[in-house]
Image (cartoon, grey):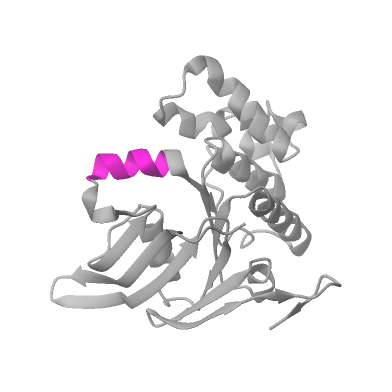
Amino acid sequence: MINKEPIIKVDKLEKVYSDGDVTTPALSGVSFDIHEGEFVAIMGPSGSGKSTLLHILGFLDRPTGGSYELEGSSMDSYDDDELARIRNKKFGFIFQSFNLLPRTSVLDNVKLPLQYSDVPDSKQDRMAKKAIDAVGLTHRIGHESSQLSGGEKQRVAIARALVNDPSVVFADEPTGNLDSKSGGQVMEFIEKLHEDGRTIILITHETYTAEYAQRIINLKDGVIDSDRKVIKRHDGGFRK
């Protein structure tokens, strides 16, 4: 069920990168809302601004213009320490490159976000094991991440994104380093997160991946080129 009030609201969002006298606009007046429980894919070619937008939405960077509100509060009202605290508590991240510690066990990789939270040490193992079980990797819990396949590494990354029970999950090209079979399995896990009630924001350049979402926002040259719903047929296919 999608609530009436948006969880994310951006209005005329801008981001300009400066290098000496050279300025490069990455976002030029982007506006949209995302409601709690939505599954939104943000698409666009390289240089379209989608990664810049992800970084701003995920509190990893600040815009140079416009406004961004999360749950009704402006990003500008928080200092950097507060942004980090909110990011750790409310957001989960799944990256194309997995971003796992290679010589560290699955359990300790998944526990990593808890090290920066107020969760007592006595609860951290239990929470991490629950997240690992949710992605079907309990049998790999003591293995180092370097011993896993690409698909298994991404499932560990999903478990790590889940461990703090975030309300919003950002997935940045989550299938980019995977074969089609492993990529499909990862997208099924992400789709299950949405079915469990989480808000999903997927960054991708792949149409088949984007069509797991309910809605696709296309970026081009830092502006929204289109914003449309995905209509799924009863046979599991899609029509645009």
Task: Tell me which corner region of the image, top left, top right, bottom left or bottom right, holds residue 72.
Answer: bottom left
- At 62% from the left edge and 50% from the top edge, which residue is drawn? 197
**Above or below: residue 102 compared with residue 172:** above
Q: Residue at x 56, y 66 (%)?
A: 40
Q: Is residue 237 above or below residue 71?
A: below
Where's residue 225, x and y in %?
Answer: 46, 85
Note whether residue 25 is visible: yes
Q: Position of residue 73 (x, y in %)?
A: 31, 52
Which residue is nearer to you in this view: 202 or 229?
229
Res 96 visible: no
The answer to whether residue 189 is above or below residue 217 is above
Whether the magenta-drawn stretch holds residue 84 is answered as yes
- Quarter of the figure with the N terminus: bottom right
Q: Which quadrant of the figure has residue 117?
A: top left
Q: Which residues are magenta?
A: 79-88
What secondary structure is the stretch in magenta mostly built from?
A: helix
Q: Is residue 132 above or below residue 124?
A: below
